[in-house]
Image: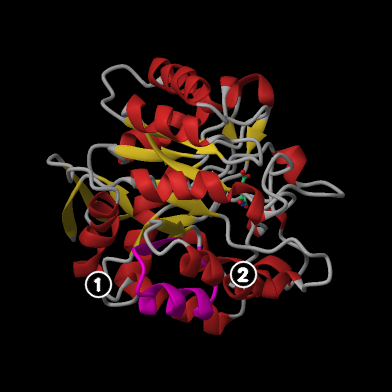
């Protein structure tokens, strides 16, 4: 039997939602991860430190008994966010970052930013106070092909932004292209990227070939196989600029299997196990610990976790669905299929 022990990993990009859905999904994350950067795209969005503090309390109250999981909070950037709010966030001690959603780019992004010049004063305050900006890196221009939106975002938005604010610390979230990986690797700025396990495992065929697969649809959309290879190379390269962020995003089954299906893939139930599978296939299991449990904490200037988790090479079958209380049920990644690693104490 093969076994690996890692410092407890953290998830640097996670959707927990709220209410019944949060109560149903939080145990999956809390069982595996020490901390998670919690996305603010609730309805209404978490735009103030006061709201983030209340949301944090609800998450803490929903933790399974005995859990020491710690949510790390974020604010949702709008064109009305003030520099004063950034100061409040910094003072709170538990808001770690601010998330930029270009308006219309993804789930619950309507309140996001339409014109980046409108948030320059806030971004300056963030650079000043060393609060990282987390970016959903896609343009929303309907003229731009959806498979090109990340690359165009780099050229039109991210590059000029970093030139204008060289001290702004940035996490390019859930990168999906070779161009994004190259950009992050080669940048002279203090910039890093999260890589999801679904973008490491799936290409666009997994979403579109042999019938449309709504449970493989997420944003940014999975790209060609060559891009998936570039992401695997980045994640397993040992560069501290790439670290784990699942973007696990629960949606009910009926909102995914619909005439207009929601974007989001649920991976929290088997996240570290799936990354282990991928790193093993890439011959890089020895690089998993830094990617999953080291580089992210370093970037956020937080201490690394001191406890550990152990993974065992033993296959188990993912359930067809998980109940979401009154909200219905969700279909997880790999539903009904095997995962080759499991958590020892699960
Ligand atoms: O696929 C996605 N789902 N991408 C996002 O950016 C948001 C997320 C969600 O909140 O469901
Ligand atoms: Zn996300």
**Quadrant of the frame with the N terminus:** bottom left
Residue 264 on the magenta span = no
Q: Which residue is mark 1?
A: 238
Q: Give the side of residue 187 with respect to residue 117, left or right.
A: left
Q: Quadrant of residue 226?
A: bottom right
Q: Secondary structure at mark 1?
A: loop
Q: Is residue 224 visible?
A: yes
Q: Earlier in the sequence, mark 1 or mark 2?
A: 2
Q: Pick the residue in front: 327 or 314.
A: 327
- Where's residue 299, x and y in %? 28, 54
Q: What residue is pinned by disc 2?
A: 150
- Reply above or below: 175 against 84: below
* Mark 1 nearby-residue class (10 Å; few <14, some 14–19, many ≥20): some
Looking at this view, name the residue that lies furthest to the right: 259
Mark 1 and mark 2 in contact? Answer it, CB < 8 Å.
Answer: no
When the figure is inspected, residue 114 is found, relative to residue 290, above or below; the finding is: above
């Amino acid at each position: 039997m093969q076994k690996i022990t890692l410092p407890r990993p953290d998830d640097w990009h996670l959707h927990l939602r709220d209410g019944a859905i949060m109560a149903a999904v939080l145990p999956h994350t809390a069982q595996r991860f020490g901390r998670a950067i919690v996305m603010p795209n609730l309805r209404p969005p978490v735009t103030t430190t006061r709201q983030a503090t209340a949301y944090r309390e609800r998450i803490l109250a929903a933790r399974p008994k005995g859990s020491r999981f710690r949510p790390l909070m974020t604010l949702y950037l709008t064109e009305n966010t003030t520099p004063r709010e950034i100061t409040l966030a910094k003072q709170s001690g538990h808001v770690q970052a601010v998330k930029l959603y270009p308006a219309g780019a993804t789930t619950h992004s309507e309140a996001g930013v339409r014109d980046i010049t409108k948030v320059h004063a806030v971004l300056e305050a963030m650079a000043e106070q060393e609060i990282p900006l987390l970016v959903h890196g896609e343009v929303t221009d309907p003229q731009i092909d959806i498979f090109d939106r990340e690359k165009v975002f780099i050229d039109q938005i991210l590059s000029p932004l970093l030139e204008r604010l060289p001290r702004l610390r940035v996490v390019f979230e859930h990168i999906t292209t070779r161009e994004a990986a190259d950009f992050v690797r080669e940048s002279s700025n203090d910039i890093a990227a999260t890589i999801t396990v679904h973008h490491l495992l799936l290409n666009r065929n997994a979403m579109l070939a042999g019938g449309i697969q709504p449970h493989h649809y997420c944003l940014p959309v999975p790209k060609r196989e060559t891009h998936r290879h570039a992401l695997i190379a980045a994640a397993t390269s040992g560069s501290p600029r790439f670290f784990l962020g699942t973007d696990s995003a629960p949606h009910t089954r009926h909102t995914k299997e619909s005439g207009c299906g929601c974007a989001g893939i649920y991976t929290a139930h088997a996240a570290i196990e799936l990354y282990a599978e991928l790193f093993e296939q890439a011959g890089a299991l020895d690089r998993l610990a830094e990617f999953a449990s080291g580089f992210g904490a370093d970037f956020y200037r937080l201490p690394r976790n001191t406890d550990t988790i152990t993974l065992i090479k033993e296959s188990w079958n993912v359930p067809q669905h998980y109940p979401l209380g009154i909200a219905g049920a969700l279909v997880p990644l790999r539903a009904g299929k095997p995962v080759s690693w499991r958590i020892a104490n699960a």
